[in-house]
Amino acid sequence: MKKLFTIFFLILINLHSTSQIDKVHPPNWWIGHKNPNLQLLIKAEKINDYEVNINYPGVKITNIHNADSPNYIFLDLEISDKAKEGSFIITFTKENKTLTYSYKLRKKRSLEDQSNGFDSSDAIYLITPDRFANGNYENDIIDFLKERKIDRANNYARHGGDLKGIFENISYIKNMGFTSLWLNPVLINDMKEGSYHGYATTDYYSVDPRFGSMKEYIELSLELKKNNIKLIKDIIVNHCGLYHWWMDDLPFKDWLNFQENYLKSNDKTIEKNTVYSNHRRTTIQDIYASKSDYRGMLDGWFVPTMPDLNQKNKFLANYLIQNSLWWIETLNLSGIRQDTYPYAEKEFMSKWAGRIMSEYPKFNIVGEEWSYNPIRIAYWQDGNNNKDGYKSNLKSTMDFAMQKAIQEGILEEEAWNTGLIKIYENLANDFYYSNPESLLIFNDNHDMSRIHTQMKKDITKTKMAIGLMLVLPRIPQLLYGTEILMEDSSNPGDHGLIRSDFPGGWDNDKINAFSKQNLTDDQIEMQEYLKVLLNFRKKSKAIHIGNTIHFAPKNGVYLLQRRFNDEIVIFIINKNKNDVRLSNDRFSELNLNNIVFSDIHSGKKFSFSKTLKLKSNSSYILKSN
């Protein structure tokens, strides 16, 4: 009886004591990482006065670091491969007071069990979770959060989409032919307004309860894997949200850039000219850049509500790296899309990506570099021969240069230096990339006007742009709703409008894109066009890994071939207002004589024996039979 009472008493102490530890990050870890070192951020009142002990085979404390704030310590652990799965107690003692925390260790996934990263065989579907589908109306409003309303008439308010809504529509995503899913951030954004987009994180280890729970996030990942769909997580290491939990008690004096300005402010506002980024991303590579311009780019806050994180602080750097590793292992992710890539310290970004790729060699990461200059895009891709010797460890970057070239190439009038030549010459720049087929190509995304709006709401031109993108030697990404011609023409470029609700994602929606209810003929036509093309692309080795040959545009016609062994895919654009007879003489090196091709959409047969008739203002995707 005495023994049972003692056990019960210890349990009560443990439960009571644990509640006095505010934060332990990462909240759990794994045995089997190549790097056995783990650094825990521990937050509790005056925790730096406590002695810390762990008694667990295979786990050793190697160092204890006090922060500038007395309410933090950073605990360095070494976790041996010989450690066993289970929980161990971290004991904190000061005089007669004891705090304890139970910390869990699991075994890291083997290489065979890790997800493959996304690549050129994939087609990525990009979703803004708040705007896709509302699967649980009970989590729309959370009383303890700052923004507590749903207003679907307001483009910048919460609309109620969530993880369950995505889960319930996985079959739609799969049947459309998508093989990867990129979600805009779903971590908690406890901001006063505009929290729907997810880019102002207020806790790096918590799912926003308006999107659902950690359990639902894991269940979504598992269900996607069952359906052979890869999951890509949107991560931001450059900045956090203004109401992040650590903003009221920052661990170090240099946790943020321009931290002293923030601390002097009583109302969490700071003078713009002293702390906001100049957004001059060219300074990162510019050999003539002034130090003030260079630091103004890296240290400045992205926007007033997003404090700039100082990755030069080694404890913050470890925190951010371990957080990414934690999410990869927790969700068995296939990839990360890293937001605002050049805004963080580039040495840190190299270390961050390098650590991830070392631990997860099958993984992929794409970085956002919003530049129309291929030289600057190439700088960030691993394997590029940079003059300054910089090695990024980053497999993929976003190809804004090709995105712009496609838009201008289709819209502009044909001339010596305008129109389709823009596409041809941009693709010709691939010699400069270390791995062009690993670049991420897109016609639009959540930050830019939708492709149907860009194409002046001309469905034929929209098909040209999408069709070309999907046959290029790239990794393609499409924004949700592209398949039903969603557009923002009433206010082009307005972010809230670009991220409009997907029709049918809410009860009582009059239009339902999932079931085709009340879609227009054009919307149904585009949805079917994409479904056929995506499912064809899913099986086409010629598009995934084939060789590429293209011919300079002539008389308003552009032809590109992808070929792998006996499989040939040909893409043709005819921008002429009249039908054209295309002679085979110019393309004789392709050896297309006596090969019968089929249009993947119409099924119509084509032969290159002499001439090929092209309809006015048309595009074709032909496959060899």
Image (cartoon, helix red, strand yellow):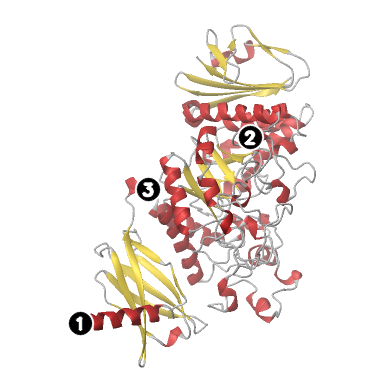
Q: Secondary structure at mark 2?
A: helix
Residue 91 seen in the current view? no
State which mark lies toward you, 3 or 1. Answer: 1
Pointer 3 or 1: first along the chain: 1
Residue 123 placement (x, y as % from top left): 53, 37
From mark 3 to mark 1, how far is it between C-alphas? 44 Å
Q: Nearer the viewer, residue 242 or 97?
A: 97
Q: Is residue 16 above or below residue 302?
A: below
Q: Amino acid at mark 2?
A: Glu
Residue under the point 30% across and 69% down? 87
Mark 3 — residue? 114
Dot 2 crowding, Cα within 10 Å, few <14, some 14–19, many 20+: many
Q: Nearer the viewer, mark 2 or mark 1?
A: 1
Residue identified by numbered label 2: 483
Image height of 489 relative to 621, above or below: below
The 10 Å Cα crowd at callout 1, few under 14, some 14 to 19, many 20 or more, is few
Which element is circle 1 on?
A: helix
Determine the image quadrant of residue 102. bottom left
Q: Are marks 3 and 1 in contact (CB under 8 Å)?
A: no
Q: Is residue 564 left or right of residue 529?
A: left
Whichever of labels 2 and 1 marks the residue nearer the N terminus, that label is 1
Q: Secondary structure at mark 3?
A: loop
Task: Tell me the CA gap for discs 3 and 2.
Answer: 31 Å
* Left or right of 168, for residue 36: left
Residue type highlighted by circle 1? Lys
User: Which residue position holds label 1?
Assistant: 3
Q: Is residue 364 left or right of residue 95?
A: right
